[in-house]
Amino acid sequence: MPENIFGTDGLRGQVNEYPMQPELVLRLGLAAGKYFTNGNMNPRVVIGKDTRLSGYVFETALTSGLCAAGMNVYQVGPMPTPAISFLTKNMRADLGVVISASHNPFMDNGIKFFDSNGFKLTDSVEQEISKMVTSPDTTWNSPAPEEIGRAYKIQDGPGRYVVSLKNSVPPELDLEGMTIVLDCAHGAAYRVAPLVFQELGAKVIPLGAEPNGTNINQDCGSLHPEQVREKVLETNADLGIALDGDADRVILVDEKGSILDGDQVMAIFAQDYMDKDQLPDRKLVATVMSNMALEVFMRERKGELIRTPVGDRNVAEAMRQNGTVLGGEQSGHIIFLNYSTTGDGILASLQLLKVMREKQRRASDLAGMLELFPQKMVNVRVKSKIPFEQSPHLQDSVQKAEQELGDNGRVLLRYSGTEPVARVMVEGENVQKVEKLVGELSGVVEECMC
């Protein structure tokens, strides 16, 4: 068993295969319970899940381990990932747990943790927990029989979360007269998401809101926004919203049927915040995958784009370090640190609708402020993940390509976190130059790394 069972965003894998095995998850509950109990009186943990059939298996295994370690467990049932982040802090819990594999198909599942402030755990904490799970020498120091934890079902979690989302919109602003197509991906948001928009006055056309345990993300949601696009055009809706299975990210569709990615949406929010002087030091945080056009967009407005490794946890940490309040990923994770500690697809959709209302502009008008640069990525299979900097020839080739691209272009080399694949990405203002350079560099990577 590898020493670190965590990936870039918790555990994830196919059900009944490592690491998503009930016996390992039971041990994970014991380890997390031991770490977070740590002498606390009446330690508490909130557990939520998405709509996967296997959620019952892992909810039970985690609850058993956590209770055996002395923690009281509060189960809230199917709820979005950001809802668990919110409830963990709102209920003064010591730990929050989400059982979800996000946008993956139903046969996968995963587990991610939040600390008492609603932030995802740091690498160092995950490593400590992982060592306890993987080491055969771990001593559990189990509590006395009368001190083990209890498990409770919490019924008012959805209501608390809905109210928190509505509070992110000024009381004088509503969505009366607006039509929204909302795809919940048959996932964790199928109950709460329609309520939020309906209670603010919008007409909601729901899609993907009939989960059966095996249809989560199946030809719907953020991975398949074309379904929302068709319905937006058919109904003349003002906005289309496509959530993923745990609703921490969103892909939006404007009234003309254009699909907007996270970079375009972040540009809208950054401009709105700068207009209101609400973006500290005019800093926006995004990952290495965000389009170069977003960096130029911020630079032209005397702002700065701070880049992080992939993962909304990395984005949130950089936001905290730099004292800024807005960040996200190209994939649709958007973080508003004034309202939430993690990516929230429902919140991001609400904030866009708020901007549309305040500025009296359509989604397509707002999205037009950022024209994305041509971007091309090629995957190259490799035998081993040798550090790129160990190849002088590759480094020379990258340097020459960057010189040819100039200030408004870039090269990114990175390895896949789950496959023996090197990703070669080039972007710039000229599509022919981008395609030429990505072809040349992928050839050099194949030559040097294979």
Image: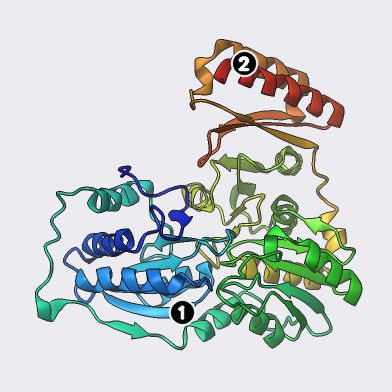
- Rendered location of residue 2, percent (x, y): 33, 42
Numbered label attached to residue 151: none
Q: Residue at x 59, y 72 (%)?
A: 187
In what quadrant of the picture does the C terminus appear? top right
Residue 267, percent from left and from top: 73, 52
Q: Is residue 38 above or below residue 149?
A: above
- Vertical position of residue 23 compared to residue 431: above or below: below
Of marks 1 and 2, which one's residue comes earlier in the chain? 1
Marker disc for residue 77 = 1
- Distance between mark 1 and mark 2 Cα atoms: 51 Å
Expressed as whole percent of the image width and height from the top left, the position of residue 210 reads 65, 80
> Element type at marker 1?
strand
The amino acid type of the residue labelled 2 equals Glu
Q: Position of residue 434 (x, y in %)?
A: 79, 28
- Give the left or right position of residue 374, taking residue 4 as reference: right
Residue 447 image label: 2
Graded by Cα atoms within 10 Å as few (under 14), some (14 to 19) or many (20 or more), the crowding at tag 2 reads few
What element does badge 2 sit on? Answer: helix
Q: Is residue 134 above or below residue 101?
A: above
The residue drawn where x is 66% and y is 76% is 169
Quarter of the rendering occupied by the N terminus = top left
- Vertical arrangement, residue 320 with respect to residue 77, above or below: above
Q: How is the image coloured?
A: rainbow
Residue 360: in sight, yes or no?
no
